[in-house]
Amino acid sequence: MNSPSSLPPEASRIDEQNRHIAQEAGLDQDLESQVPPRYGSFTATILGVILIVLFVAVVWIVF
């Protein structure tokens, strides 16, 4: 990956324009800092169901 200092002058100018336009539009969030979810919705649902079943089993065994 190239660092901004190693870009040719034309690319640096275009990058600066893009950043300025994004900032004016309110789109200047750093997309690289957004971490995707660790688990998808299907996996989270299955994990939730398993936890509920385990909780019910423990309650049934104890009481």
Image (spheres, helix red, strand yellow):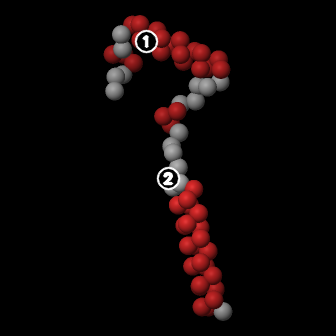
Query: Which of the labelled discs sits on residue 12, or is there none?
Result: 1
Label 1 – label 2 distance at C-alpha: 34 Å
Q: Residue at x 43, y 12 (%)?
A: 12
**Residue 46, image x, y percentages:** 55, 66
In this view, 53 is above or below 13: below
**Residue 7, image x, y percentages:** 36, 14
Label 2 neighbour load within 10 Å: few <14, some 14-19, many 20+ = few
Q: Residue at x 36, y 10 (%)?
A: 8
Seen from the viewer's position, the closer of residues 5 and 63 is: 63
Q: Residue at x 34, y 22 (%)?
A: 2
Label 1 neighbour load within 10 Å: few <14, some 14-19, many 20+ = some
Helix, strand or loop at mark 1 = helix
The amino acid on which the numbered mark 2 sits, given as a three-letter code, is: Arg
- Is 32 left, or right, of 57 in this rendering? left
Q: Residue pushed farthest top?
A: 10
Q: Which numbered disc, 1 or 2, marks the residue that appears first in the sequence?
A: 1
In this view, 9 is above or below 38: above
Query: Which of the labelled discs sits on residue 33, or is there none?
Result: none
- Is 15 left, or right, of 2 in this rendering? right
Image quarter (top left, top right, bottom left or bottom right) of the N terminus: top left
The amino acid on which the numbered mark 1 sits, given as a three-letter code, is: Ser
Residue bearing mark 2 = 38
In this view, 59 is above or below 36: below
Image quarter (top left, top right, bottom left or bottom right) of the C terminus: bottom right
Count of number-bearing discs: 2
Q: Quadrant of residue 52?
A: bottom right
Q: Residue pushed farthest front?
A: 42
Q: Residue at x 59, y 20 (%)?
A: 22
Q: Given contact means CB atoms under 8 Å apart, are the residues at marks 1 and 2 in contact? A: no
In this view, 48 is above or below 54: above
Q: Quadrant of residue 19?
A: top right
